[in-house]
Amino acid sequence: MSATQKTSYGDVKNAILKRIHDTVWAPGSLMPGEVALSEEFGCARATMNRALRELASDGVIERKRKAGTRIKSSPTRQAKFVIPRIREEIEATGFDYRYALIERTEETPPDWLRARMGRKGGDDVLHLRCMHYAGSRAFQYEDRWINLASVPKARVQAFEDINPNEWLIREVPFSDAEVIFSTVNADQMLSEMLNVPLGAALFTLERITWFKAMPLTYAKLYFHAGYQMTTRL
């Protein structure tokens, strides 16, 4: 940036967010110090401090005295929303966790998905269908779509040995999330996947995550019959 051009804290904040999104600074990594960042961005230290304070308030970074500033592995908003890991939930019940990828395809997003994600364009998406097991019992069926325009590195990820949720948490920061809870009656496919009677009531969770205004992924999760969810904020 030009030395004669005044740099606002908003410009600095957006530039840092772009670097985080592009994984110039990966989730969990340590950022350069405030003085070094001020020099690099050509702004006053007070400007940089304000940008970093807002990013910390937004839940994107974590600032600790002496320990420095770190990119959060799972950035959260002030509501402290943390994306749960199904592996941890299953293992906490004493069962071994097992994951199976059923199908992986690159597709043009259907109209309903574009509407849900608020996208007018036809950016390709990666469609993943997966099963999660607690021991030998079917625990959750996952139907997930990843926006390849915002997460291009997902295109080369096989997702055979790591489930998409764990991979996204590790690789891609998010800034916003929308979660919808509902129930559905099991159709033939869900009946077979989750080993439940046809028409059984199933707890479902829909989740969309964004980085700023860019949608990252949409997932619809179907849980085994009788599943209960506990949430703490």
Image (tube, rainbow, N blue to C red):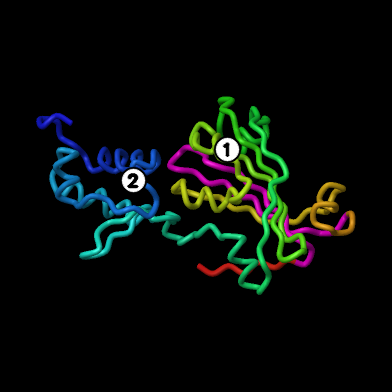
* Residue located farthest toward the bottom when viewing the structure as drawn: 94
Q: In percent of the image, x 36 and y 44: which residue is there?
A: 20
Q: Give how far across and how far down residue 80 sits, in percent.
A: 45, 62
User: Is 169 on the left or on the right of 143, as rendered?
Assistant: left
- Asked whether 96 or 34 is in front, the reply is 96
Magenta span: predominant SS is: strand
Residue 188 vertical position relative to residue 127 in the rendered view, above or below: below
- Asked whether 102 or 78 is in front, the reply is 102
- Could you tell me which secondary element the residue under label 2 belongs to? loop
- The residue that label 2 is drawn on is 25
- Per the rendering, the mark at residue 117 is 1
User: Is 132 on the left or on the right of 169, as rendered?
Assistant: right
Q: In percent of the image, x 48 and y 49: which residue is there?
A: 176
If the image is split into quadrants, where does the N terminus sit? top left
Q: Give how far across and how far down residue 133 sits, in percent.
A: 71, 60
Q: Give how far across and how far down residue 22 sits, in percent.
A: 39, 38
Write the start and end of the magenta stretch as one range.
199-226
User: Is 28 on the left or on the right of 180, as rendered?
Assistant: left
Q: CA distance from mark 2 to mark 1?
A: 26 Å
* Amino acid type of the residue that numbered disc 1 sits on in the rendered structure: Met
Residue 147 vertical position relative to residue 139 in the rendered view, above or below: above
In this rendering, which labeled residue sits more in front, label 2 or label 1?
2
Q: In the rendered structure, does residue 218 fall within the stretch colored magenta?
A: yes
- Asked whether 220 or 99 is in front, the reply is 99
* Amino acid type of the residue that numbered disc 2 sits on in the rendered structure: Trp
- Could you tell me which secondary element the residue under label 1 belongs to? helix
- Per the rendering, the mark at residue 203 is none
User: Mark 1 packing: few (<14 Cα in 10 Å), some, or many (20+)?
Assistant: some
Q: In percent of the image, x 27 and y 55: which residue is there?
A: 53
Q: Across the whole image, how many numbered discs are drawn on residues?
A: 2
